[in-house]
Image (spheres, rainbow, N blue to C red):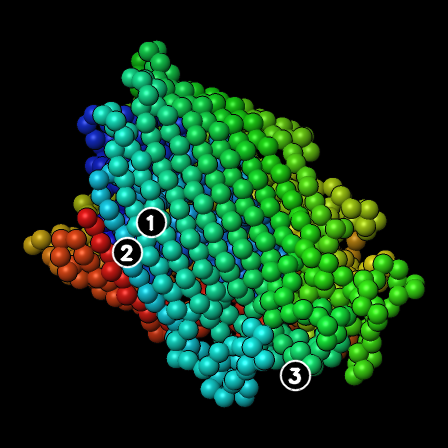
């Protein structure tokens, strides 16, 4: 739940409504004696620009207010219900995406939003999403690796900004500003759990229904006893800051511990373990600034995130994949991962006597994803197989060197700001191999097969088929998959802002980038704000943008098993530079190109404010993951091959809106806000060349891309606060989503026509409304207790009766599939 003061703040900063507007609680306007650059916001390098006079829409979210009034425990969950155009949800049956939630702005890809921390570029996750509904074929930034209790505020620039900040900023920019408070210890202990009543008519024996039990030989494949609640989450946080020196220096530190159990929801027979992954995580973040001379400050920030995650894979029921002596009747492997995310930033800031602000910094970050597959086996080893394998993993590191200059000129027009700078970035992507049993196929003598002409795998006596090798659930990376690739990037930019008059602002930016692997790009942006009256502002922008293909999209490769209604299919995902990829006619990846435009206005009258922002985002050469090409003739022991391609052009149009009102009375307050996003994406062109479109990027693949841009999301929020008591009520409406299930992969002849097949394969998730409720009780000056629930009426997506992507009775749509969550939280401040 959100405090109304926070929501009005979000509204006010969504649009520039007047230079005379009053400062909000998040200190957009500096206090007397503060330096303006201390409150510089994303979207402008003008140290005098604030959210109340910017030319672009910027949401400011006070994380402290949100976390103290909500049971949501991760950053993605918080933003899903606060920011109208932000979408993120949990996945199941999506390999690594079960452990890192794909997140996006305005329906674009997870990799089309740039993330900054304290204004510095954040590294991405090394994971590339291969399954699920959002982010197929995309990499993204793992926001959940940043502890929520370390964050002072989150700034969301809802506008294309590649000309200002570089690659990835097609949809916008999320800037996370870390805590800098001192002499205060804050923290909380919270606990919550999900209601397991999935409210569906499921067949007998379905996972987690009342008659379901499964406990197989203590090998880690037990789903546990039937319970009224699961997914229990415990979170402990603490934040403390100390002063450094006598000139305003500080060091602020945050620690977080999270333990979240799995959820288990109804799944089909081939997907008995359907639900959210478990997480045990430890987070640390530090933020410091130290004046070392009168004009030079040293600053540093960074942290470490450690997560031990555990998710269910698809159940193995078929004969050649099951060894009865180990798992009688079948088994459900578990994909576990150790995710380590490290980052460190250090730099110097100074202001010269002539007024130039200079910032020199170096940023380093690395994400490591290491897989261990448990409750599994290598079927070709038969009864001699271990039940746990180190499957290898991947990592991504990034080092960025920045030098930035900016200066305000008060004597030019009504004010001018000039900024320029340069950046040099080096990235490295690795895939490292697992142990041999995780990927090898063994012959009848128990030796790895190196020559298929003279060696053969054991034959299953029931199916008559050769037993497959590798760890079931997630085959390990082999030496053939190993990658160690790097690239460098140099960029330079100039931007300027002109206050032509007190009412009229114009700003522009130009940025040049050169990548060592695909060449150069030049992008520009122009934006403006016009103050029509004291109550109304009009603003707009137009820009070009780009996103460089990630190293993972260029070099990632693996073999995996895909389950559909036709059974199990062995698939090769081939690297873009592979001879196999070239043999299928797939071209080398190039950058995505974007054209952004927006137009918005705001109205303020007394305690009521309103903002409306329309936008258009056209993307050419969007990188997608193809369908499955027949690869049986390759001689690689796979049935199909899949590739990353610049495969589609998309056009997106939308509208963001926020209306808010607040009234104070007798020491208390009451208010409401209505937030919304209306969004429409269309696929303008599939760039399949001479290849078959339905194989290259067919109707099913298109449906997944379009589902990542839901047609709408609306939130209506009420808050009440007086003395020792507070309450909040929130309604969120998630729009309809349509996906195509695995019937699209069956024979068209079975349906009479292609059109009939599409109708049969369509899974429609109708619009749903989710209700959140919270109550707060101030127990003392230092303690506050909150109790409440998210999705208190236990609403689920519509049940589907066919083979959905995740193998449960729902796909991973906007509202999630875990039902009601009830929590209590004890916060403290000393």
Which residue bears the numbered disc 3? 329
Q: How crowded is mark 1: few (under 14 residues within 10 Å), some or many (20 or more)?
A: many
Residue 493 seen in this snapshot: no
- Local secondary structure at mark 3: loop
Q: Which of marks 1 and 3 is in front?
A: 3
Ranked by sequence position, the earlier of labels 3 and 2 is 2
Kindly identify the residue that appears in the image at 7 percent across and 54 percent down: 666
Determine the residue located farthest toward the right in the rendered image: 453
* 404 relative to 748, above or below: above
- Residue 188 is marked as 2
- Residue 365 is marked as none
The reply to whether the C-beta atoms of the residues labelled 1 and 2 are less than 8 Å apart is yes
* 639 relative to 248, above or below: below
Q: Distance between the residues labelled 1 and 2?
A: 9 Å
Ranked by sequence position, the earlier of labels 1 and 3 is 1
Q: Position of residue 385 (x, y in %)?
A: 71, 70
Kindly identify the residue that appears in the image at 42 percent across and 64 percent down: 260
Q: Position of residue 594 (x, y in %)?
A: 57, 39
Q: Quadrant of residue 693?
A: bottom right
Kindly identify the residue that appears in the image at 21 percent across and 37 percent down: 22
- Residue 149 is marked as 1
Kindly identify the residue that appears in the image at 81 percent across and 62 percent down: 448
């Amino acid at each position: 739940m959100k405090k109304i003061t926070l929501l009005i703040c979000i509204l006010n900063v969504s649009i520039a409504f007047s230079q005379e507007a009053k400062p909000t609680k998040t200190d957009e306007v500096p206090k007397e004696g503060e330096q303006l650059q201390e409150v510089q916001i994303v979207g402008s390098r003008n140290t005098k620009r604030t959210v109340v006079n910017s030319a672009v829409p910027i949401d400011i979210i006070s994380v402290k207010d949100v976390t103290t009034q909500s049971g949501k425990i991760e950053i993605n969950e918080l933003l899903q219900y606060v920011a109208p155009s932000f979408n993120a949800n949990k996945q199941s049956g999506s390999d690594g995406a079960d452990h890192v939630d794909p997140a996006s702005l305005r329906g674009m890809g997870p990799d089309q939003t740039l993330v900054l921390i304290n204004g510095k570029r954040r590294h991405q996750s090394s994971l590339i999403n291969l399954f699920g509904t959002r982010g197929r074929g995309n990499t993204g930034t793992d926001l959940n690796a940043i502890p929520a209790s370390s964050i002072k505020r989150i700034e969301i620039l809802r506008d294309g900004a590649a000309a200002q900040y570089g690659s990835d900023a097609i949809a916008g920019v999320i800037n996370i500003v870390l805590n800098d408070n001192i002499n205060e210890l804050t923290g909380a202990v919270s606990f919550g759990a999900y209601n397991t009543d999935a409210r569906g008519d499921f067949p007998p024996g379905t996972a987690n229904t009342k008659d379901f039990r499964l406990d197989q030989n203590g090998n880690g494949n037990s789903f546990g006893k039937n319970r009224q609640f699961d997914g229990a989450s415990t979170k402990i946080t603490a934040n403390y800051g100390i002063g450094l020196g006598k000139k305003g220096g500080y060091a602020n530190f945050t620690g977080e511990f999270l333990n979240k159990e799995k959820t288990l929801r109804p799944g089909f027979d081939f997907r008995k373990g359907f639900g959210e992954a478990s997480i045990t995580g430890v987070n640390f973040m530090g933020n410091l600034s130290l004046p070392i001379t009168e004009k030079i400050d040293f600053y540093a920030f960074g942290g470490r995130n450690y997560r031990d995650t555990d998710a269910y894979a698809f159940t193995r029921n078929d004969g050649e994949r099951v060894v009865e002596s180990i798992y009688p009747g079948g088994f459900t492997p578990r994909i576990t991962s150790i995710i380590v995310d490290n980052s460190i930033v250090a730099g110097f800031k100074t202001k010269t006597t002539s007024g130039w602000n200079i910032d020199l910094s170096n940023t380093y970050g690395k994400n490591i994803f290491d897989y261990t597959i448990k409750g599994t086996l290598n079927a070709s080893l038969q009864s001699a197989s271990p039940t746990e394998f180190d499957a290898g993993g991947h990592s991504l590191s990034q080092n960025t060197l920045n030098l930035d200059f900016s200066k305000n000129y008060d004597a030019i027009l009504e004010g001018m700001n000039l900024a320029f700078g340069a950046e040099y970035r080096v990235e490295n992507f690795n895939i490292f191999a697992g142990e041999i049993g995780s990927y090898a196929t063994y012959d009848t003598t128990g030796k790895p097969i190196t020559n298929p002409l003279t060696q053969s795998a054991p034959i299953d006596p029931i199916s008559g088929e050769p037993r497959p090798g590798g760890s079931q659930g997630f085959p390990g990376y082999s030496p053939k998959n190993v990658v160690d690739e790097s690239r460098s990037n140099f960029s330079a930019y100039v931007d300027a802002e002109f206050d032509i008059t007190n009412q009229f602002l114009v700003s522009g930016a130009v940025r040049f980038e050169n990548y060592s692997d695909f060449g150069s790009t030049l992008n520009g942006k122009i934006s403006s704000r016009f103050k029509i009256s004291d109550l109304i502002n009009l603003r707009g922008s137009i820009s070009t943008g780009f996103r460089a293909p990630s190293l993972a999209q260029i070099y990632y490769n693996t073999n995996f098993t895909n389950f559909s209604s036709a059974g199990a299919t062995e698939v090769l995902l081939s690297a873009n530079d592979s001879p196999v990829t070239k043999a299928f006619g797939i071209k080398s990846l190039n950058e995505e190109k974007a054209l952004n435009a927006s137009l918005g206005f705001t109205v303020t009258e007394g305690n009521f404010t309103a903002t409306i922002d329309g936008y258009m985002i056209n993307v050419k050469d969007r990188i997608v993951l193809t369908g499955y090409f027949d690869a049986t003739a390759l001689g690689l022991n796979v049935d199909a091959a899949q590739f990353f391609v610049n495969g589609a052009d998309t056009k997106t149009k939308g509208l963001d809106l926020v209306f808010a009102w607040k009234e104070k009375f007798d020491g208390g307050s009451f208010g409401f806000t209505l937030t919304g996003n209306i969004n429409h994406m269309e696929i303008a062109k599939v760039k399949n060349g001479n290849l078959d479109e339905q194989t290259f990027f067919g109707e099913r693949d298109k449906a997944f891309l379009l589902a990542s841009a839901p047609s709408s999301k609306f939130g209506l929020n009420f808050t009440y606060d007086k003395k020792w008591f507070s309450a909040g009520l929130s309604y969120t409406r998630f729009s309809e989503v349509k996906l195509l299930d695995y019937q699209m992969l069956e024979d068209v002849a079975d349906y009479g026509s292609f059109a009939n097949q599409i109708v049969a394969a369509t899974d429609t998730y109708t619009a749903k409304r989710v209700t959140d409720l919270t109550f707060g009780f101030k127990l003392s000056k230092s303690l506050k207790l909150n109790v409440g629930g998210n999705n208190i009426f236990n609403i689920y997506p519509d049940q589907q009766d066919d083979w959905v992507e995740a193998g449960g009775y729902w796909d991973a749509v906007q509202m999630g599939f875990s039902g009601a969550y009830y929590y209590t939280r004890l916060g403290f401040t000393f």
